[in-house]
Amino acid sequence: MSQPQLNLSPAVSDEIRKTTCYMCACRCGINVHLKSGKVSYIEGNRDHPVNKGVLCAKGASGIMQVTAPSRLRAPLRRVGPRGSGAFEEISWEEALQTAVGWLKPLRETAPEKLAFFTGRDQSQSFTGWWAQAFGTPNYAAHGGFCSVNMAAGGIYTIGGAFWEFGQPDWERTKLFLMFGVAEDHDSNPIKIGLGKLKARGARVIGVNPIRSGYNAVADDWYGITPGTDGLLILSLIHCLFEAGKIDLDYLARWTNAPLLVNETEGPEKGLILKNAESQPFVIDRRTGAPAPWDGKGVQPDLGATWQGHRTVFQHMAERYLAPEYAPEAVADRCGIPAARIRGLAAELARVAFDQAIELPIAWTDFRGDAHTSMPGRPVSFHAMRGISAHSNGFQTARALHLLQIVLGTVEVPGGYRFKPPYPKPVEAHPTPHFGVVPGKALNGPHLGYVRGPEQLALNADGSAVRIDKGFTWENPFSAHGMMHMLIPNAHAGDPYRIDTMFLYMANMAWNSSMNTAKVMEMLTDKGEDGEYIIPRIIYSDAYASEMVAYADLILPDTTYLERHDCISLLDRPISEPDAAGDSIRWPVVEPDRPGHAGVRGFQSVLLDLGARLGLAPMVKEDGTPRYADYADYIVNHIRRPGVGPLIGFRGDGTQEGRGPANPDQMAAYIANGGFYQAHVPEEASFYKPWNAGYQDWAVATSFYESPQPYLFSIWSEPMRKFQLAAEGHGAIQPPDALRARLQQAMDPLPGWYPPFGDAGAEGFPVHALTQRPMDMYHSWGSQNAWLRQIRGRNFLYLPTKIWEGQGFQDGDYARVTSPNGEITVPVAHMAALNENTVWTWNAIGKRKGAWALDEGASEAKEGFLLNHLISELLPEQADGQRWSNSDPVTGQAAWFDLRVKVERVGPRDHAEPAFPAIPRVVAKGEGRA
Amino acid sequence: MTMLPGPTPKKLGLAIDLDTCVGCQACVTACKGWNDQGYGAPLSDQNPYGADPSGTFLNRVHSYEVQPADAPAQLVNFPRSCLHCESAPCVTVCPTGASYKRAEDGIVLVNEDACIGCGLCAWACPYGARELDPAAGVMKKCTLCVDRIYNDNLPEEDREPACVRTCPTNARHFGDFADPDSKVSRLAAERGGFALMPDLGTKPVNRYLPPRRKGAAEASPLAPLLDIRATGLAGWLDRVLGKI
């Protein structure tokens, strides 16, 4: 019998160009294959540190993104009412002149009237630099509505958090716990890590109300009630304390547990006790006398009491041994039986203490004490938005880090490992800057880490400097700003009115806002003078998103394959525990929008705007532009002497970390596959915050200017300072209405309080959540011909108790009501779910007419958002104030505090609310390119 | 009717680990991307931006909910593609000889030049592994990336199916099930790899590695150091710190 002769070695492509993916925020390396100058196939780059060759569903669908019919094609100027979709295409020159015409007078008279917020921006060190040069205090990216609780909770406690900051020691960990991990954060590294654990049979445990994705493959699952993770964690800590299963040596050496807490009544009560040189000190077990916290050979006594002042450790014991944290006391609230909590604590203790490991690597700590090995406790954790998107998320993140600390499993083999430039304590971060002088640059970077009330961004009269009220008593540690409050505050004129809102890559008229329908009204509302209350809106996006219709001027961005970018160590880098890393994007294909004015990379446009505005760092002495484009900036910008956006190939091309600009740097990155890695020396690979070898390497590689060893802040002094203020101490005092809330939220020891959503939730017994699918990224995926075939619909998933209790059937819809609103949406049954929780996929629902989709698209007809149910404000307080629906420490949007009731309404054919179609700015997509 | 080749010296196929697959769909689009520009006609999409988009995929991932009587419900993610059966009914049913099983390695392929798009093979396949491409009018199915696995133009490490290369959790393994020492044979042996619906007599080559048993670990509860209510915090501290 004959079979066809096949060509088994066909040519794969004409050329491979290596760049960085942007189908989500993961920043994987990709090989883009080209045939006849067009993208033919995209696969993962095997050499790349993030993804090591693999690629997710989104990344492999990038070819459909670069040809998506939703791509914008030319600058647009609004010519009809805002939201009507009436635009005219204009030239780039006209667009830039228009923007300059709006922005220049603001800069000269009132720079704060420009609010510049960037969404899923991967160039925040650049966009922040631009905003600083402009002089407005109103800049942030999207962290405030994303995961600032995780980031800030980690920085304030251990000097790092998850994702960019650190990751489990996937090679050595024996027990891995995930708390509230959605299925994409961070995407491929978590999956690669899970694969490694599975391959060697290591144990994985999921703590999540929803048992899908990573939790579906977990060996055990704790279907926790939303908002109670912190309580569960503190109960685990209770069990460990009760049994004495805590790493005392670790606590004594590397944390502030042995420091003394000032017990003297007055303005310093509860602060860390200092000596005459203003240095904290410990009691040395060898002498029973005070000794420097960082003294050579000192053996800090955890149990010391000195002149009536007790150690942090004693406060911890008193707090966490209290019966309120006993499993039996928290079980009902958490939805997890007490025996299961005790079982989990036992499992943690058994692996941490009975299965400890040790690497034969000698190192020296910052005290000068030499160690012959690196002992490790092979328990590791990861957590994400499930714990952070609550109004108690900051304290919950701190509680999780405390659990890691008492198990002695941060920065040890088998535990959690920092990724350079982390570890980095609060003290090594800037404080927020907000000094505005018309015509001048801001007096420093906008965002930072507050140490005490004196650093709040307040005017002399106590009012907020920032439009989002970041860094105020309402949210003192809002390290990422509060983008979700921008539009409501600008609309309310509270704290003041702005003139121009300038947004980048943030779909604020749809899935990125709470209370979406109301936000759309705010964007189109006019005052008594007939003018828009938010007078001008400039928006940059690559695609015809819902937000485009609400802008006055559109600056069309390129797709990710058509642009330069820089994934910088000044920003959110791509490091691994064993190597600092950064990377670039470059135009592997040229932007091509035939017949139109075309698109430009947003960062290049910002540089052009900056030069036209005469912003000092963007012009030469003769007034001409300093940078030709973003690529020029990436290579030639000097942030500090010898330090630029990229650490690789500096100077003569061989210098790493520090060195002069190298005109050939971009070419060197491209030749190297689009990235660079600076490898951590072996003796510096663990114990980084205290490892002299690591500290010296970090200085050499430009992360610090001097070594920055520090102790983990179990007892947070910055938090205690805010409590003291709430108690009436100090010159800068909070409003009376906020004192009780500050007292609770700014607890210097990790604690738990019920999510604010619980107040006023009577009659709304069910928790409602969203999860991001692994195959979609926010709103970007639905325009993708392949991805929308995988997930073109979302359902509200109902647990068995609700499904059977109300007699739901396939094809049914439910009316879902919250204190803020009502939606009617398609439902489906899911048994692997906390019995009081409903959920849906994030951002599948689309506005009709957006993203070049058909108006009958399932995303636009049956797809829905929970956002309509979520208010950006909490209910009115006793004083008539409505505070933002955010964490009271960081201002993180409390998306997951949402409480609803669910009622069966039977079969329907579309979801409510159904908004009218937005007129198209690009034609509806037809066939595939 | 088309003849099967009889026992093949190699039995190339996939071992898919259901204990590890998180259902991320990476293999689905990597397969679509490679095969859209690889063997045979492109994998077309109909109304890709319309109300009811559909397209040809050679590999799809489904999620099923399992509700054990004595344990909480769980999801199992299940990738589905051609199993390259030894007794492939899709081959024997083909009226033109287009559907065939390669004699050298057992890969089941469609010779698109001979395919008349009658759809009999899709009907005969009990696994739903074949899709008729509406644009090309020919039957499409998993080729095990026959244009990758022997391709001299690819680095050796890349000579594996696109779905295997891309899988972020390493849940997909490619190899020769005729070789008992191959990685896939050993995985199947160690992990109880099973064939899908063996009673049908199709003798699939691919193996699925079943989910491992889930549930609580067998750990004895932690014993309290002492009765804190009796000794107070001071007693606890003495006891704990005495251990240093």
Image (cartoon, grey):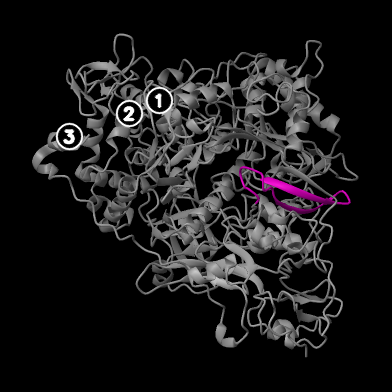
- Does label 2 lie on the same chain as label 3? no
> How much space separates mark 3 and mark 2, taking CA atoms?
17 Å
Q: Please state if A195 lies on the left or on the right of A595 as rendered.
A: left
Residue at 58% across, 65% down:
B183
State the mark number for residue A278. Answer: none
Furthest-right residue in this view: A595
Q: What element carries label 1?
A: loop
Residue topped by disc 2: A253
Q: Position of residue A410 (x, y in %)?
A: 41, 38
- Does label 3 lie on the same chain as label 1? no
Q: Position of residue A665 (x, y in %)?
A: 75, 28
Q: Observer-nearest residue: A21 or A251? A: A251
Furthest-left residue in this view: B230
> How much space separates mark 1 and mark 2, taking CA atoms?
10 Å
State the mark number for residue B242. Answer: 3
Magenta-highlighted residues? A29-53
